């Protein structure tokens, strides 16, 4: 009588994908995938890009031993990049192309879009998210545990304070740290970077290495506010930086560097490192000036976060894995943040054709086997609200329009390159936690000083500086970003054919654009209504039942709720007067 039960159990296990044999050359199991995503880190804020102001030995070691992705493009701000990363789609297809979601704004990544953790779960993965979400939480269905993750410790909004975990929007303010679907009231006074690092280490320590792990550590750092760890051991390391805010920023970056070392060491101790893919990336460039300024530096690249110039969308990125075809190199191939969905799904053993219509391109055959370069063009963005758009094809980049009338379009952060620097410390990289872990578990790494020097030179952007540069807010700009990576000279008139080719790309995607909903902040989201805590405030069942779900319906239901509250109050007042 027991045999049917045993047969059924085995069938369920096999069909779940857990016991499916993975074949990828010498590997018979799917790789563990760790995505280490940081927030608002500038191009010039890692020392492998040529600056000796902020040392990042662990980040450098991972990059030198893997592949430095020197032309990795993101979107110009947080929400669009994260939507693109998880969906494999350009944000214009989902109305997610504009500014980040604000607290109390009833919108999020559309629920009909399947995202990376959902796809990986189909392959037997256990997907975990630690840190930043920022893809909507107006209904519970829009939060991480209902979007494919089986574990979440983090925050819903764009950022929080590093010690008390509060977020403010207008006159609304509240606690925003959640474990699963519940507020994490038991956590307090722990520096956010350390908190999320310790959670990642704990997840790794308790994971069964037989089963593939997807761990996305989306750090708060180094998003504003500038809050440094009070117990920082690196104060003396940055005494050479005279500007106080830049020095504090350096301390925050160093804590992230330490975090990466601890995560890699934990993977090694768990015997998972030899079967892992680790991605290090930023979601966009640093906001050197203006809103949420963090004293980061994109030098010598032009522009900041929010712009389509290189300083806004050419993000720091590297990938490491023993499965890579050739390591210790710099790649200047075009890669876009949408590419990670098909690339990681392919690396996990999935058939990319099963992902449906996406914009991302599978780079895994190129990265793991050295096959042909998969991408020669990409859409940077089309934003119908800010009236900016841009695209790249091979070495040419077309940009139109300017965010906030060009306020962010110049060159900032020069002090991060030419001032307050020290000699590059090769010994620090070679003796880093990341180098030690790779050496202990996989043999000696390729981080000898001669190799580091060569890779660092290749990863450094050099520009022939000019006193003037072209503004693109009144005309279109074409740049040769291979020979003019700092985008100083507009060559549109010299290359009309190239302009036409890039115009065709923009027209193609412009016809697919879904407009941004631009919904007003909903007073019903006020944390004071929920124990001074940011949490979902709309009922998804009510929305779908009354209207059929869409963004405007969410706003309509919330408005309806406000009207009901007001109506009831007026009724009570009227009855009181009558009595």
Image (cartoon, grey):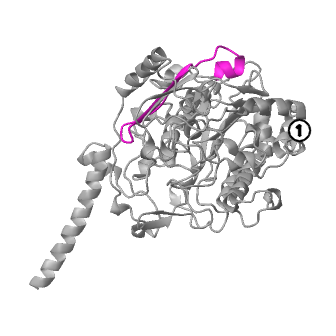
Q: Is residue 354 depicted above or below 51 in this figure? A: above
Q: Is residue 575 magenta?
A: no
Residue at 46 percent across and 67 percent down: it is: 173
Residue 451 image offset from top left, x and y in percent? 86, 30
Q: Quadrant of the N terminus?
A: top right
Most extreme residue toward the front, as rendered?
467
Residue at 63 percent across and 54 percent down: it is: 295
Q: Judge by depth and name the residue closer to the eye, 147 or 522.
A: 522
Residue 45 image offset from top left, x and y in percent? 69, 46
Res 195 quadrant in image: bottom right
Residue at 69 percent across and 43 percent down: it is: 44
Residue 243 image offset from top left, x and y in percent? 70, 59
Q: Judge by depth and name the residue closer to the eye, 451 or 135.
A: 451
Q: Is residue 7 visible?
A: no
Q: Is residue 312 left or right of 249 when viewed as pictured?
A: left
Q: Is residue 272 left or right of 473 when viewed as pictured?
A: right
The span shown in magenta is: 364-393
Q: Quadrant of the C terminus?
A: bottom left
Residue, disc 1: 440
Res 346 quadrant in image: top right
């Amino acid at each position: 009588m027991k045999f049917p039960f045993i047969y059924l159990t085995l069938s369920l296990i096999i069909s779940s994908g857990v016991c499916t044999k993975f074949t990828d050359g010498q590997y018979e199991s799917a790789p563990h995938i760790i995505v280490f995503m940081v927030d608002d880190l500038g191009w010039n804020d890692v020392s492998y890009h040529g600056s000796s102001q902020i040392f990042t030995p662990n980040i450098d070691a991972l990059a030198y031993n893997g592949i430095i992705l020197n032309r990795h493009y993101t979107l110009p701000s947080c929400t669009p990049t994260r939507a693109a990363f998880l969906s494999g789609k350009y944000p214009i297809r989902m109305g997610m192309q504009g500014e980040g979601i604000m607290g109390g704004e009833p919108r999020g990544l559309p629920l009909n879009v399947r995202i990376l953790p959902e796809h990986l779960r189909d392959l037997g993965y256990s997907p975990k998210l630690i840190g930043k979400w920022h893809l909507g939480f107006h209904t519970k269905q829009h939060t991480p545990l209902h979007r494919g993750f089986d574990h979440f410790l983090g925050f819903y909004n764009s950022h929080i304070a590093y010690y008390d975990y509060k977020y403010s929007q207008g006159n609304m303010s509240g606690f925003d740290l959640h474990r699963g679907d519940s507020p994490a009231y038991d956590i307090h006074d722990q520096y956010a970077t350390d908190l999320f690092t310790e959670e990642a280490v704990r997840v790794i320590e308790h994971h069964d290495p037989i089963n593939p792990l997807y761990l996305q550590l989306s750090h708060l750092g180094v998003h504003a506010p500038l809050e440094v760890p009070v117990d920082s051991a690196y104060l003396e390391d940055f005494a050479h930086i005279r500007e106080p805010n830049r020095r504090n920023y350096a301390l925050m970056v160093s804590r992230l560097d330490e975090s990466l070392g601890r995560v890699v060491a934990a993977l090694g101790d768990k015997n998972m490192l030899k079967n892992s893919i680790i991605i290090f990336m930023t979601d966009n460039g640093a906001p050197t000036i203006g809103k949420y300024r963090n004293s980061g530096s994109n030098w010598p690249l032009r522009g900041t976060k929010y712009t389509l110039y290189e300083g806004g969308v050419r993000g720091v990125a590297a990938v490491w894995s023993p499965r890579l075809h050739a390591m210790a190199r710099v790649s200047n191939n075009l890669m876009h943040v949408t590419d990670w969905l098909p690339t990681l799904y392919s690396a996990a053993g999935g058939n990319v054709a099963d992902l449906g219509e996406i914009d991302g391109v599978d780079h895994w055959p190129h990265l793991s086997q050295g096959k042909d370069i998969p991408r020669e063009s990409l859409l940077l963005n089309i934003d119908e609200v800010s009236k900016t758009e841009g695209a790249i094809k091979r070495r040419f980049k077309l940009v139109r329009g300017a965010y906030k009338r060009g306020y962010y379009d110049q060159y900032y952060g020069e002090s991060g390159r030419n001032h307050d620097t020290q000699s590059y410390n090769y010994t620090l990289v070679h003796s880093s936690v990341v180098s030690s872990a790779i050496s202990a578990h996989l043999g000696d790494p390729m981080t000898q000083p001669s190799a580091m020097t060569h890779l660092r030179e290749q990863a450094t952007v050099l520009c022939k500086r000019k006193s003037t540069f072209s503004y693109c807010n009144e005309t279109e700009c074409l740049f040769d970003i291979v020979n003019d990576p700092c985008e100083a000279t507009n060559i549109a008139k010299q290359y009309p054919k190239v302009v036409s080719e890039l115009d065709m790309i923009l027209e193609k995607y412009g016809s697919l654009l879904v407009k941004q909903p631009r919904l007003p902040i909903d007073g019903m989201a006020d944390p004071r209504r929920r124990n001074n805590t940011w949490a979902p405030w709309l009922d998804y069942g009510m929305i779908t039942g009354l209207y059929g779900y869409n963004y405007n319906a969410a706003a309509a239901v919330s408005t309806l709720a406000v009207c009901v509250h007001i109506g009831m109050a007026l009724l009570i007042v009227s009855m009181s007067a009558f009595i």
